[in-house]
Amino acid sequence: MEDYAIIYNPAAKKGDSKMDIEYAFKCLDDLNISYRSVETKYDGHAIELAKQLAKDGYQVIAAGGDGTANQVLHGVITSDSGALCGFIPMGSGNDIPAALGYKADVKRACEIIAEGFSGTCDIGFARTDSGIERYFLGIGSQGFDSEVARRSNEDKEKDYNMIILTLLKEWENKDIIVKMDNDTFEGEANLAAVGLSGAYGGGMFICQRASIEDGLFDISIVNIDKVKLARQFRRMYSATLLPHPDINEYQSKKVRVEMRILEDESYVCQVDGEVLGSLPVTYECIQDGYEFIRPKTNEFAEQFKEKYGHYMWECWDELEKRKNM
């Protein structure tokens, strides 16, 4: 039997991932890695495949974007097999592998698999009151960003930025309640992001202080005028958004989010780009919750620092203090 099962999504990168997939197989072959490959056929198929392949004794690798990555990790974890899970990033957004230190580099990801290093990290668990459950490594959110995810998933051919611009024109904030270990937020918000790691949407750092090693979520509750919100996107990509006067930041192990006015149409919630449904939802951070195949050092963080001059978790106020020392 082969050592690894590679679950790949031919629809990754809006269907433009064929060359990446073929290149990944070549890299794995060149590294003498023993594997079988399995193609996903429909939404949710990766969960089913990962769960069964993990039970069958494979170490399971997700080859695709964040949607495939989330479905595979959820399937592996819920298999109760203890199988290792790893990633070959080849999507439009690769925030989940990045949380573990992977660069968006197919060849390097294959080398990481061959190196055989693994380590535990925190995992997130989300459960809606309607009973939908999902493990995750990135961000759970509700509000403007989750509506963008919903529309993007419904129309994968549509440009992501165009979805954002269209939604900005019609968006109206609503009141939410966010209950945390030692704090409660109650009021109007564009969005509430519950970050196990820092970024979503292909490198937008909304919870840039978040770490998968501290046993806590970092929560960003945003109430920025929607015109001004659009101007913050560049700062998210360069991880220079926080601190911000219109963003409340918290840390908590458990988080519950619900609508304050029950008559309001509910925000939807999503984790790792996978829409779970309407609020309420409860999140739990499980410290050292699972073991993943990962690089020995955070190669994504080093790549980010080389590009922007600082690590993504270093907020601008900390950088200013350092300059003035």
Image (tube, rainbow, N blue to C red):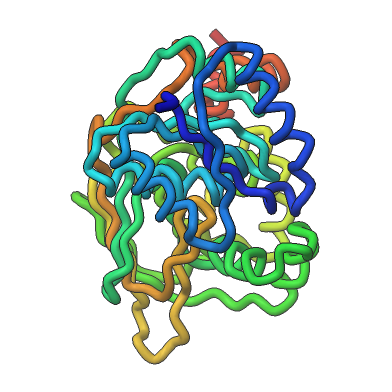
Q: Position of residue 283 (x, y in %)?
A: 29, 55
Name which residue lies at 73% across and 27% down: 23
Q: Is residue 172 visible?
A: yes
Q: Position of residue 59 (x, y in %)?
A: 39, 30
55 sits left or right of 107 in the view: left
- Foreground of the two, 286 or 232: 286
- Which residue is the extreme one toward the front? 1
Name which residue lies at 54% across and 63% down: 43
Q: Position of residue 128 (x, y in %)?
A: 31, 68
Q: Is residue 323 above or below residue 81?
A: above
- Foreground of the two, 9 or 151: 9
Name which residue lies at 68% across and 17% down: 309
276 sits left or right of 203 in the view: left
Q: Is residue 211 visible?
A: no
Instruction: Locate the C terminus by quadrant.
Output: top right
Q: Is residue 9 above or below residue 187?
A: above
Which quadrant holds residue 166? bottom right
Q: Is residue 92 above or below residue 45?
A: above
Q: Position of residue 14 (x, y in %)?
A: 75, 53
Which quadrant holds residue 305? top right
247 sits left or right of 225 in the view: left
Instruction: Locate the N terminus by quadrant.
Output: top left
- Foreground of the two, 159 or 257: 159
- Foreground of the two, 66 or 241: 66
Q: How many labels were placed on the picture?
A: 0
- Which residue is the extreme one toward the left? 181
Name which residue lies at 29% across and 38% down: 216
